[in-house]
Structure formats: structure tokens, C-alpha cells
Amino acid sequence: MVKPLPIALGLALLAAAPALAQNTGTIRVGFLSPLSGAFGILGAEQLRGAELALKKLDNKLGGVPVQFIKEDSKMTVESGQQAANKLVENDQVDVLVGNMMSNLLLAYVDPVTKQGKIILSGIAGPSKLAGEGCNANVFVYSWENNSPSEVVGKLMTDAGMKKAFFLSQNFVTGREHAAGAKSLYKGEVVGEAYVPIAQVDYAGEIASIRASGADSAFIFLPGSAGIAFLKQFANSGLKDRVKLFSGSWLADELSFEAVKDAALNVNLVAPWFAGLDNPANKEFVAAFQSAYGRKPVFYAAFIYDSIMALDAAIKSLGGNISDKSKLIAELSKANFNSTRGAFKLASNHFPIQNYYSAIVVKGSDGKLEHQVTGTVVANYQDRFGSNCKMRN
């Protein structure tokens, strides 16, 4: 039987782990996101964004070679914890990127950060981490979950919607998005439904929307769920009577070919669209189109930004990441050129950014695309940061 290490020695080795990783002459970056299951298509888009960023940087961060290690978090808390544990314990990664699902991130955030690792979240942005549970080692490059849908709610109000139905998937992210939309929608909430992530038959929910008398509906159904809903909604005869509002996750370049005209005129909100006119975004979109034959989706853009932010921070440190506090300080500055243009991080390490409105239209080539119609809010910051007392 192998005897356990003495406690003092074990703690010493644990504390030395980040420095040991650095001494190899490489920076170990772990990618953790669903690559299978209902969200697998979304995780794959994140992976494309990460790989494209590393290709642009010649597989280096701040001039230091990168070892990039991928793990499938799958769709459950248990599988996410196991994958995170492998990356931290076995692979000794310095930084964890990707991070799609908020319930999974909440499950592994403490074990990962207590070992000195830094998490750059490309999508998951639970309100707990923006507020009372904020963590100095966590940086979110997407949004706090309520925020984009708060702006959707504002857009619904600005558009004169009087009666709205709210439909969302039933997990942390989905419920926070729905709550956000309701918080800034000033009309009457005439119904709401929360469905399993794997659900693809929405006949019952569409019947409820019809019976409610709604003139609009907020929808949080990313990925294959959104494709199924849009098709069924278009066939229901309600499309001319009920306007659909959502974030850009409902209809994008991953789903356009599948949903076809069922996505036309859907009203969307996001801090990033492929058509945003700034140098960093033009370069990113062109590179993505060259590599994959289509425009990217925000899942790719956000993680691309997070890799660029990491590169800028490490470069400012001369490639030395052995001092965690210095790396955190540099990351906090967000001193990089974002695909979104104007971009800052608040004191809780969540974004301050513009949100834009768009509708789905047919472009000159006959293909679906997002037509940006305006800025809904500028320099929007989540409402939970005032409760953040940053901790390590």
C-alpha cells in the first residue's frame, strides 16, 4: 500500500504546481466545454474560436509556446467536475478556457481556483459569480446571464409590446436569462414555461402562447432546441401575430441552414454580431470564413477575445506567469483589441459593453444573415457587481 504524503509536503507541492508548470517553458491552456450532447455543436464553435486565435498567435501566448488540452465537459455537473479535475490535477493547466454551462462552472469554480488556476469563461456568466460569489481568478468575456436578456426586455418595451410570453430551458442559465428579460420588460407577462434542455417538441408551449393572447414571446432555446422551436412556430400560423425576441443564440450561422425562412424577422440582441465594423472583428470574421466557409457565431467570438486578452496580459509580463497576482492584475485591464470594439471589464471581472439589436434577413446572396439595426444600450454593466467583494 502506498502511504499518503505528509500533509505539509502535500500542501507545498500543491502550492508549487503553477510554478512547476511554468518551468517547462510552455503555458498549459485547458479547454473545457460540451463537445457532445445537446450543446455539443455550441462547444465545437467555441473550440473553433480558440483554435483560430492560437493559430493567429502562432500557438504562443505572450511569445511563450502553448500546450492546448481539450476535454469534453458533456452536459452534467458530475462529468464537468471530472473533466475539470483531470485538467487541473493530471494535466496541470495554468488557465481554463471555454466554460459553456453556468451550472457546471459553479460546480468546479472553487476547486479549480483554490489550486491557483485562472478561469476565462467564454459563455457561462452566473449572477452568483458577478455578485457575492465573485472570484479574483475568474474572468467572464461574455456577459452576466441576466444582462443580454435584460436588454432584450428593454427592446420589447421599446418596440411597444404589451403582452409577452416567456419560454426558456430549465437550468441556471435559462432561468437567469428569463428573469433578466422580465426585469426590463414593462408590459404584462401573460405566461411562462421552463422546459428540459433536451426537449425538441414544443407543441404544448406553442399552444400556451396562442391561448395567452401574447403579442410577443421571449425565447431562450439555444442550439438544436431553437431550431426545432422556430420550425414548429413557423408552421403554427402564429408568426404574423406574435413577434419573437431573443438573444442571437436563437438564430445564427449554426442554425440558418436548418431553419431557413422560419428565422426571418426574428428580433435579436447581442454585444457582438459578425457585421460589427471594427478592425479586430473584420480580421476575425475574414479568418473564420477562410477557415470554415461561413461567418462565425458569438460562441467563437467570445472565446477568441478571451485568448487575445490572455495573450496581451502575458505579453505585458514578458511571458512570465509565475506570479498569479500580476497576471490577474494585467487581465483586469482588458488591454486588447476586442471583436466587439469598445470593451472593458468591471471590478467583478464581468464585461462593460454595448448591446446591439438585429433582425434576421436575406442578404444579397439569398442567404440568411443578421442585419444590425442599432445600439440598444451603450456601456452596459451587470447589476450584481455592487455586491462583489473580490476574493482569491
Image (cartoon, grey):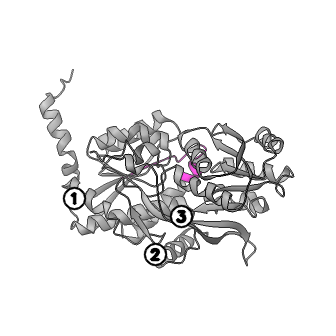
Q: Give the Cα separation between the discs numbered 3 and 2.
A: 15 Å
Looking at the rendered image, the quarter that the N terminus falls into is top left
Marks 3 and 2 in Cβ contact (< 8 Å)? no
Disc 1 residue type? Lys
The residue sitting at 18% across, 23% down in the picture is 3
Mark 1 or mark 3, which has the lower sequence index?
3
Q: Which tag, 2 or 1, sits closer to the chain's start?
A: 2
Picture quarter with the C terminus: top left
The residue where tag 3 is placed is 271
User: How far from the left and from the top, in percent, is residue 12?
Assistant: 14, 38
Mark in the foreground, 1 or 3: 3
Category of crowding for the residue at label 2, using alpha-carbon neighbours closer than 10 angstroms: few (below 14), some (14–19), many (at least 20): some
Position of residue 281 relative to residue 89, above or below, is below
Labels 3 and 2: the sequence-earlier one = 3
Residue sticking out furthest to the right = 237
The secondary element bearing badge 1 is classed as: helix
Q: Which residue is mark 1?
A: 326
Q: Residue at x 51, y 41 (%)?
A: 74
Three-letter amino acid code of the residue under disc 2: Ala
Q: Is residue 323 shown left or right of residue 378?
A: left
Q: Position of residue 388 (x, y in %)?
A: 35, 47
Residue range highlighted in magenta: 30-43
Q: Residue 280 shows which numbered tag?
A: 2
* CA separation in Å, label 2 and label 1: 26 Å
Q: Is residue 356 visible?
A: yes
Q: Is residue 251 visible?
A: no
